[in-house]
Structures are given as structure tokens and as C-alpha cells.
Image (cartoon, rainbow, N blue to C red):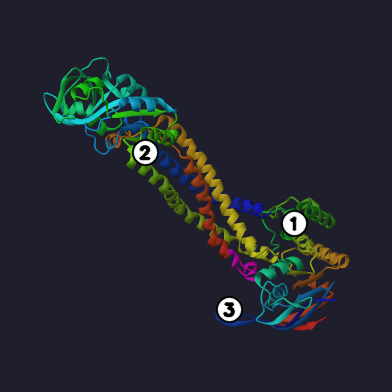
Amino acid sequence: MEILRAENLVKIYQDNGVPVHAVRGINLSIKKGDYIVIAGPSGSGKTTLLNLLGALDRPTNGKVYFQNEDITTKSKSELSKFRLNNLGFIFQAYNLIPVLTALENIEFSMMLKGIPEKEREEKALALMEELGIKELAHKRPNEMSGGQQQRVAVVRAIVNNPAIVLADEPTANLDSKTAQHLLELMQRMNKEKNITFVFSSHDKQVIEQAERLLILKDGMIVNEE
Amino acid sequence: MLFKLAWRNVWRNKRRSLIVIGSVIVGMIAVILSDGLSNGMLRQMLDNQISSNILHIQIHKKGFNDNKIIKNYIEDSDRVEAAVNNTRGIKAYTKRVITFGLLSSANSSAGVFIYGIQPETEKEVSVINSYIKEGNFLGTGKRDIAIGQKLAEKLDVGLGDKVVAMANTPSGSIGSDMFRVAGIFQTASSDYDKVIIYVPIETAQSMLELNDKSNEFAMMLNDYKNVASVKEELSAKLGSEYEVLSYQDLLPMLIFQMDLYRESMWILNLIIGLALIFGIINTMLMSVFERIQEIGVLMAAGMKSYQIYFMFIFEALIIGIIGTLLGIAAGLLVHLPLSFTGIDFSLFSEALESFGVGAVIYPVLSIENLISVLIIIPMIAVAGALYPAYKAVKLEPVYAINYV
């Protein structure tokens, strides 16, 4: 079942008055349960594409449809709600909220959805236990390693049962062993919970595990495997 | 969670937050001290005037207050006395003869207000006898006179010296009498000490050919808060022939000053608040710029603009409330001992005495002012966060997340 579709997506930035064509007419369809890796060299437009798919940025041209609804015309407030209800994000630099504990970071999006405190704590702790990071619950980000932080970030991204998790270079700051563990975790979530993952990465480990690989070059998909 | 997030954000940069809170505390101490001093000064001016001379309520023949001539005496003293005796809430009263005259010594003379008083009842209503610096307040001697220190200096007289008082009688002739200085007083007001003299009421009545008549009934109430109701009752009983005046009627300028001060207190607090606002704006702006990437993550997580906005507002509010509460506590720590010991302004005592304040001012804190700072300062803190919070919500998520 298709959940996200990009049609003729174009993004042009202005860099000191010079137009930069980051994404040039991309068409893409993402189905429920996909495990997609968008790969390509630096500057190929991977992150820009991911930002457009995640409604963090607006295209210069083209449309993004989520379950056949155009999200490119939504207001800032509507997009916040859309991201809250449908998307999970994993960032290269983990980006946990530094003043919150791991548990609170995971609970955060549930809090935004208005889920009662007890329910969200139970859900967060259950998922943390399932993924083997329950002992990190009361630690703050500065008390955790990079790998631990990224695991917490993965739990944070999936705890709300999003339709899609968008992961931008999630292993870039991790050593290969930690990266492998993290990828296994996400693959497990994909298989067991049917969560859709879309990665942008040029990490070989990530690319090797892709079920569907899109190669980007100069803002265009040049190959799909 | 939003409040928890704001609370923790306040303390993520402790030093910076403490500096802002410190500036609020200093501002609060300044507000409390300046308010206490101003309030204390005005209160002392009022209290001194009431307790030494004005009292809570005065009754005269209509027109006497505007034209203090001896002709305006109370003709039916018994009726007034009966009305006073039959009115509840009056603690004590006294009768006075008051007129303008001349007091002369062998060396000099001065224009004075002659107060013919009943020494025993005067002591029950006023504290003038407590201001005696030399000698005694009026006793049993018919020719005793009590004068102020400044007047004694001007006339160059001391205890036991003779002085002659002269004043118009109701018939227009000049009445005069010789007195001996029995007491010299010094009140908080140098002006008062220059112009007021006290003599026994019987001697004054005799000198002024008043028989047993007087110009004034002055009284203290059990509770000054009942002034309006007692005044109304006496006015109703005495009718239009008499004027029943409260201390507010008798001291309009001072009451006006106190009212004006109460009104301007909000403006003063606002000015201090405005001085604080720039520190808060600066801190909150730094806080926003330091957390741009984090704001982006919050946006990506689905946090709405108004939630981000209120997170910053809460942070400022926390700083404002903590600063205000600690500031009030610190201000009270400074204020309370001073309210008992007073602050000695001997260096400026001449100026203060001319205002009827006294050299030592006892700060008095008004609850209204405490409430006003409790409201104004946190509001100012919130106002200081409006622009930084606006900057935060105007960020585009993609720009914020990738901000380095």
C-alpha cells in the first residue's frame, strides 16, 4: 500500500544569490513496510530529499502526497500536526533534548499528542525494555555514549507508531560495530512492527542492508535497485 | 512537560540565569527600600501632624478653618460637647482656643498661633507634652506658656523668662497677658516649633474676652478607620452651623501627596522593570540562538509554534517569579530591621524637619506595592521574552535542524 508519493519534486536554494538545484524532478513512491536507502555522494541531494519527504522543507516545485493528500500546501501548524501523527525522525547527531532524560525524550512526542503520563511512561519503558535500553531511562544525553543516544533516538522515532521513519545518516557518527547493532535494531522494527524506514546515507553498512536502494546524483535518481 | 522543559532550560546555563535573577533581586531591594522610605516619610509627616496637633476630627464654627479669627468661636459649647459625648468611637476630646497673635520678649517678637488648651485633656489626645525638651508642659500655673525651641531661640528666651502675648479680642480690642516660659518643646517640624505656643485655656479665654467659649473641639477616635462614619454622625447631629472636619480635610496637601505617591508607585515599579527588561531580552535571545538546532528538533517532533513560544515565555516567567520572590525576601531582610531601628538622616535633618518628618525615618512597606511588584516584574520578564520567543517560532525547521 502506497503511503507517500513524490511527484516531480524540485528544490532550488539560493546560495548568495546563486541558484542551487538540490533536487531536480524526483518521482518516488513509498509503500508501507518499505526499507529504503537513498544513497549518493555528498551534495547529491539526499538530505534535501529527506527533508522534503518529511515536510521539514517546502519544494520549489512538485508535490508530496501522504496517503493521497497533498502535504505541500499545508500551513506550518498543519505540518507540525502531520509530523507529530505520521512521522518519526532520526538525525545524524542524535539530537536528543539535552535537558530531558532518555525516558522523557521518548515520552516527548506522546506528551505532544496528549497521551496521559502514566500511559506514555508505560509504553516508553516497555519499548525501551524490548530494545534493551531500559537501564538508560533516567540518564540524560550527556551521560550516554553516541550509540546509546542513537538507540534512544530510534525509540523516540518509533514510539508513536509513525507511518514512516526518516533517518538522515543515522550511523555517520557511530563506529561500525555500534552502527551494525543499530541497523539490526531498525531492521527488526521493520520486520516485526512493519514500520517503514527511509534512510539517507552513503554508509556501506546501511546501503548493504537496503531492501530498496535509490542512488542519487546531482539531485536526480540515477539508479534504483 | 512543557513547564518541566522550561524549568530545566532555565538551569542549563546556571550562571547566566543567576545573573539575571540577581539583577531582578537588586531591583526588588531598590523598590522595597525606596517605597519603604517614601511611605515611611509620608506616614511620619501625617502621624506627626495628627498626633501633635490635628488629631482625627475637629469641630469648629462654620468658616473657622478658612478664617481663623477669634470672632469665629463656638457659641453653644454645651451642645457640641453633648454631641461629642453621645457619639460612639471617640476615645478622647479636648477644647481649644486658637487665634493668631504676637509674642514678644525683651529682645524680639514673633507672629504666633496662640493655642489655649486644657493641659490634662490635651495630654489624652495629643503627644505634644512628649516633645518637651526643657522644663514641663503646662501645669497648674495660670501664666505658664510652652513654646517651641526655634521660637525660644528667635525670642532669645529660656525657662522662667517673661514673654507677652497679644491678640485681637472678638470686640476688636487688643487683649494681652504676660506669661512665664514653663516648657520648651521640639517637634519633628521646625515650622511648627516656630509658630505654635500653648497657654492654659482659662488664661486665653480671659485675655481674649471669650468667657468660657472656645474655637475648637478636637478629638481622637478609637480607630482612625472610623473617621468618615464618626464625622458623618457628628455633622448630622450638629447641623450646618458647625464644620466637622477629618484629618483628611485638614491636611489636603499631605493626603494628596500620599495619594499621588500611591498612584506613582506603579510607574516607579514600571521604570525599574523596564531597566530589567533589557537584561531579560538579552538572556532570552542568547538562549534562543544557542538552541536553534534543538528548536528545529522540537519542530520536527511535531511541537507547535505556540508550544515553543510558551516554552520560552515560561522560562522568562520562571526567572521573573524566582527573582521577584527572592528579591522580596531579600528586600524584607533589609527592610525589617530598618523598620524598627529607623534610618538616621541627621545630615539632612533640617530639611526633613521643615517637612515635619524628623531626623529618623522608619521605613513602612505598603502591601499594595508588594502586590504591584509581584504582578509587574514577572509580567516584565514575560514581556522581555516576547521578541526572543517570536524569533524562535519564526525559524524554519529545515534551517534550524541544520544550523551549526
Residue B123 located left or right of residue B274: left
At x 48% / y 55%, what residue is drawn? B277
Asked which secondary structure carries label 1, the reply is: helix
On the question of residue B277 being in view, the answer is: yes
Which residue lies under the disc numbered 1? Answer: A107
Q: Do labels 3 and 1 share a chain?
A: yes
Spatial CA span between label 1 and label 2: 64 Å
Residue that extends furthest to the top in the rendered view of this protein: B140
Whether residues under marks 2 and 3 lie with C-beta atoms below 8 angstroms apart, the answer is: no
Asked which secondary structure carries label 2, the reply is: helix
Residue B47 located left or right of residue B61: right
Spatial CA span between label 3 and label 1: 38 Å
The quarter of the displayed image where residue B130 is located: top left
Label annotation for residue B248: 2
Image location of residue A153, percent across then percent down: 75, 61
Which residue lies under the disc numbered 3? Answer: A15
Image location of residue B174, percent across then percent down: 13, 28
The quarter of the displayed image where residue B354 is located: top left
A177 or B2: nearer the eye? B2
